[in-house]
Amino acid sequence: MHRAARPRVPGTHRAAPAILAAMALLLPRAAWAHAGRGATPGDVWHHWSGNPVEILLVFLPAIWYAVGVRALWRRAGAGHGVSTGQTLAFGAGILTLAVALLTPLDAMAEALFSVHMIQHLLLILVA
């Protein structure tokens, strides 16, 4: 049997490895999540966020929500307007934000790319 020959484009068979090698030189040697020195395993538990701005930005919406739900439930009755399940889901979301941004998980995210990605998943999928 005779196989049909594929048409060849002149010079392409030698150019592909050179292009791949050039692209490999452009790839980063390490993936850095953020600049700065991250926490080491020995001191990670000492890296709780004490920044009042961060704490306020996480918990201020929760306080506003609680005040609003309390006022709504006083007028309409508990569970009306906003269900108990919705309130619990909001609280779980705020708790997830606090875990992702205020605990030592945030400090480890600066040192380990895998933890940084876990932090992203908590913020995107859970919270």
Image (cartoon, grey):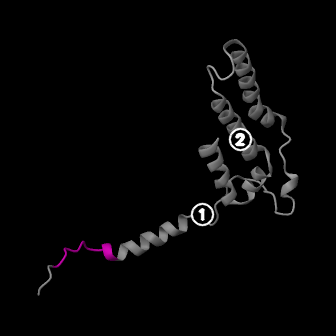
Whether the residues at callouts 2 and 1 have beta carbons within 8 Å, the answer is no
Which residue occupies the foreground of this view, 75 or 91? 75
Farthest bottom residue in view = 1
Question: Could you tell me the amino acid type at mark 2?
Answer: Leu
Residue 117: quadrant of the picture: bottom right
The residue depicted at 70 percent of the width and 43 percent of the height is 96
Give SS at disc 1.
loop
Q: Position of residue 115 (x, y in %)?
A: 69, 57
- 29 in magenta: no
| Residue at the image position 73 percent from the left and 15 percent from the top | 74
Locate residue 124, reporting x and y percent: 60, 44
Prevailing secondary structure of the magenta residues: loop
Q: Residues within 10 Å of mark 2 (few under 14, many from 20)?
A: many
Q: Does the magenta stretch include residue 8?
A: yes
Screen quadrant of the N terminus: bottom left
Disc number placed over residue 57 in the picture, else none: none
| Residue in the picture at 88% in, 53% down | 46
Q: In this view, does 66 lie above or below 42?
A: above
Residue where numbered disc 1 is placed: 28
> Of all residues shown, which one is farthest toward the left?
1
Q: Residue at x 59, y 45 (%)?
A: 125
On screen, 13 above or below 83?
Answer: below
Q: Earlier in the sequence, mark 2 or mark 1?
A: 1
The residue identified by callout 2 is: 97
Write the start and end of the magenta stretch as one range: 5-13
Q: What residue type is labelled 1?
A: Pro
Q: Nearer the viewer, residue 37 or 126?
A: 126
Q: Where is residue 51 in the image (x, y as percent from the top left)?
A: 84, 39
Q: Distance between the residues labelled 2 and 1?
A: 30 Å
